[in-house]
Image (cartoon, helix red, strand yellow):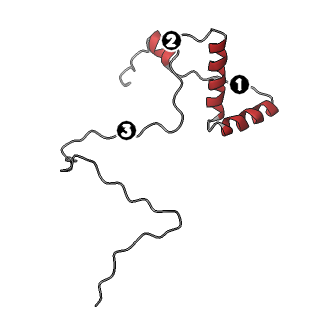
Amino acid sequence: MTGPTPPRRTPDSRSRQRKQMLLRLDPAVHDALARWASDELRSANAQIEFLLRRALKEAGRLPGSAAPIARRGRPPKQLPEEGPESPPKADGGGPEPPAERPEGHPPEHAPEADT
């Protein structure tokens, strides 16, 4: 027997997915693009998308329906919903983050009691 049929994708949902494409570049162009992307703290893929969107916008050809480009960096961490297993603290805050120490410094220890 076969499992349930996956839901069909509508044309609208299909158009909202990220499109994949193969792009062949001259090695020197790729190297220059990779260096530029590194300088901008982007991946080569993100740099290509940034440049293509900028060119489309300048030419007046960027569709209004195009989703905005993703922000730089790692996406924000999704905080879990507070449930019965994680009661809120009395002060209303979450767990306290560990104290930051300068690099190369060992963690401080509690003073030892004299015996």
> Which mark, residue 65?
2
Amino acid type for the residue under numbered disc 3: Gln
- Density class for disc 3 (Cα within 10 Å; few <14, some 14-19, many ≥20) is few
Nearer the observer, 29 or 91: 91
In contact (CB < 8 Å): disc 2 and disc 1: no
Q: Residue at x 76, y 34 (%)?
A: 32
In contact (CB < 8 Å): disc 3 and disc 1: no
Q: Position of residue 26 (x, y in %)?
A: 80, 29
| Label 3 or label 1, whichever comes before in sequence order | 1
Q: Secondary structure at mark 1?
A: loop
- Density class for disc 1 (Cα within 10 Å; few <14, some 14-19, many ≥20) is few
Query: Which residue is label 3 attached to?
Result: 78
Amino acid type for the residue under numbered disc 1: Leu
| Label 2 or label 1, whichever comes before in sequence order | 1
Asked whether, in this view, residue 99 is left or right of residue 47, the answer is left
How many angstroms separate mark 2 from mark 1 (CA)? Answer: 24 Å
Nearer the observer, 5 or 48: 48
> Which mark, residue 23?
1
